[in-house]
Image (tube, grey):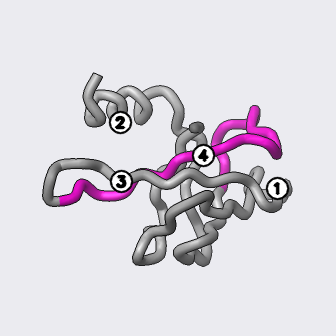
Amino acid sequence: MSDEENYNKQVKEDKVGNLLGKTTTHSVQVQFSDPTIERNSYFVIYGEKDEEGIRTYYVLNIEKLWSESKGMLADLKVCGDRPKRPFEIGSEVYRA
């Protein structure tokens, strides 16, 4: 299965939320749409395709998890390589 097929499959099945608030190259805030998220979960944010058609992705884990009136929120931190620019607000977050 190609990277693009994996990406399309994951988009349909594993979306758990969207980025909101302040984003940096090493941390983000997410609002979850999936109530089954636990503090030891890992997540993926996909970047744009590069010149060779390869889609970059970043693995993140929960640093802090809390609930408030608008739902369940978390601060996530990047594991491993970081992007060169901050993540886009509103980007979709997927279960890893």
Q: CA distance from mark 1 to mark 3?
A: 26 Å
Q: Quadrant of the N terminus?
A: top left
Of labels 3 and 4, the one closer to you: 3
Pointers 2 and 1 in contact (C-beta within 8 Å): no
Circle 3: residue type: Thr
Residue located farthest toward the front when viewing the structure as drawn: 80
Judging from the image, what secondary structure is the residue with disc 4 in? strand
What is the crowding at mark 4: few (fewer than 14 residues within 10 Å), some, or many (at least 20)? many
Taking 73 as reference, is 12 above or below it? above
Q: Which residues are magenta?
A: 31-50
Name the residue carrying label 3: 56
From the top left corner, tell me how far across and down residue 8 is, in percent: 33, 32
- The residue that appears at 62% across and 67% down in the rendered structure is 28
Of labels 1 and 3, the one closer to you: 3
Circle 4: residue type: Phe
Circle 2: residue type: Tyr
Of labels 2 and 1, the one closer to you: 2
Taking 34 as reference, is 69 above or below it? below
- The residue that appears at 36% across and 57% down in the rendered structure is 47
Name the residue carrying label 1: 65
Of labels 4 and 1, the one closer to you: 4
Name the quadrant containing residue 63.
bottom right
- Of marks 4 and 1, which one's residue comes earlier in the chain? 4
Name the residue carrying label 4: 43
Q: CA distance from mark 2 to mark 4?
A: 14 Å
Q: CA distance from mark 3 to mark 2?
A: 10 Å
Judging from the image, what secondary structure is the residue with disc 3 in? strand
Name the residue carrying label 2: 7
From the top left corner, tell me how far across and down residue 68 is, in percent: 83, 58
From the top left corner, tell me how far across and down residue 48 is, in percent: 29, 58
What is the crowding at mark 2: few (fewer than 14 residues within 10 Å), some, or many (at least 20)? few
Name the quadrant containing residue 80.
bottom right
